[in-house]
Amino acid sequence: MSAGLLVLGCGVSSVAPTGSGKAVAVTMAPVSTEVSTLGVEPTYAAQATALVEVIGPVTFTIVYDNNTYVPSLRTDWGFSCVVETGDAVVLFDTGGNGTILLDNMEELGFDPQVIDAVVLSHIHGDHTGGLKGLLDTGARPVVYVPASFPESFKAPVRVQTELVEATDPVEVLPGVHTTGEVGSSIVEQALVVETGAGLVVVTGCAHPGVVEMVRRAKAAVGGEVRLVMGGFHLGGAGRDQIEAIIADFRELGVQQVAPCHCTGDLARQMFAEAYVDDCTLAGVGQQFVIAPSQ
Ligand SMILES: [Zn+2]
Ligand SMILES: [Zn+2]
């Protein structure tokens, strides 16, 4: 059974998850690009010759989250997302438990051995706890961490693979960047991915503030922000605060949002009401294919 196509706005779900264990591709209207399921080539490829310089589709698959989407996958508190650029595979965060991470990746068809780089957002265990399990499979991705991570975390990773400590923005692989360290009490970095349709910013928990993370992403890489996805860390926020954040997102030109993990129920609801079809209330197994505009 193939996974169904889905055009999803918050609270507007046209096709239920299939439960097949396959990721379900999602696009959010208005999007002038194609939606594909895993294993199906986007029709974009056939039209690519018309463009002078082509950046192919970039795929983001949530492999770890506390929100359900594909029912056969395991949910657990934490976050992890696989980014496939066509040239490289990057894992952003690892969830809290290596077994759950690896089980979900296997069910979604991701081989740990093909991951080129792991980028960790911040030190909390629900984002870093799966790394050891991943490395214990024999996978040897280059691991990028905020430089302020404690030595007790960094030293064992260095034994197994190459570790890069980021203070300033770093280009991990072509088109895939980190913001470098943001914040002071809980230092965090976000992933910033260039696509032919704008930047995609992926946040872990956004402890320094999700607006600040987006600002830093734009400053680091430049360009319009197509999508912000991940944890927005607004579980304790009230209506006024969330309204102000949505207004800041608009001012920053954020076109689409996919809040999950630690965003909080009220914030998810308010983003859904504000962004309508340009918001996806994301969960584990959800997949976003961002292709160039035509
Ligand atoms: Zn955290
Ligand atoms: Zn978290």
Image (tube, rainbow, N blue to C red):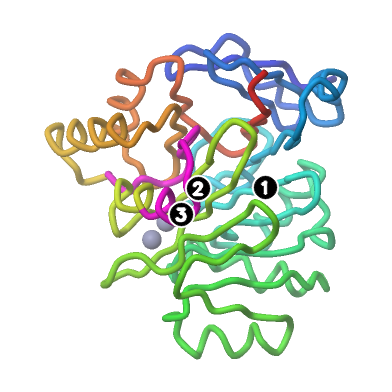
Q: Quadrant of residue 107?
A: top right
Q: Report the residue at 71% width, 26% height from top.
A: 19
State ligand 1's quadrant: bottom left
Kind of residue at disc 3: Gly
In the picture, the disc for residue 202 is 2
Is 99 left, or right, of 28 in this rendering? right
- Residue 268 is left or right of residue 11, and the answer is left
Label 2: state its secondary structure. Answer: strand
Disc 2 vs disc 3: Cβ atoms closer than 8 Å?
A: yes
Residue at mark 3 = 204
Does the segment drawn in magenta span residue 259? no
Residue at 63%, 69% in the rendered image:
131
Horizontal side, residue 88 vs residue 167: left or right: right
Give the label, 2 or 3, closer to the camera.
Answer: 2
**Which amino acid does the dot numbered 1 rest on?**
Val
Numbered circle sitting on residue 83: 1
Query: SS class of the residue under badge 3?
Result: loop
Of the two numbered discs 1 and 3 in the rendering, the one whose residue sits closer to the viewer = 1
Front in this rendered view, residue 83 or 38 = 83
Whole-percent x, y for residue 79 in the image:
52, 52
Q: Is mark 3 within 8 Å of ligand 2?
A: yes
Residue 99 drawn above or below residue 181: above
Q: Is mark 2 within 8 Å of ligand 2?
A: no
Asked which quadrant contains residue 98, the reply is bottom right
Classify the position of the C terminus by image quarter: top right
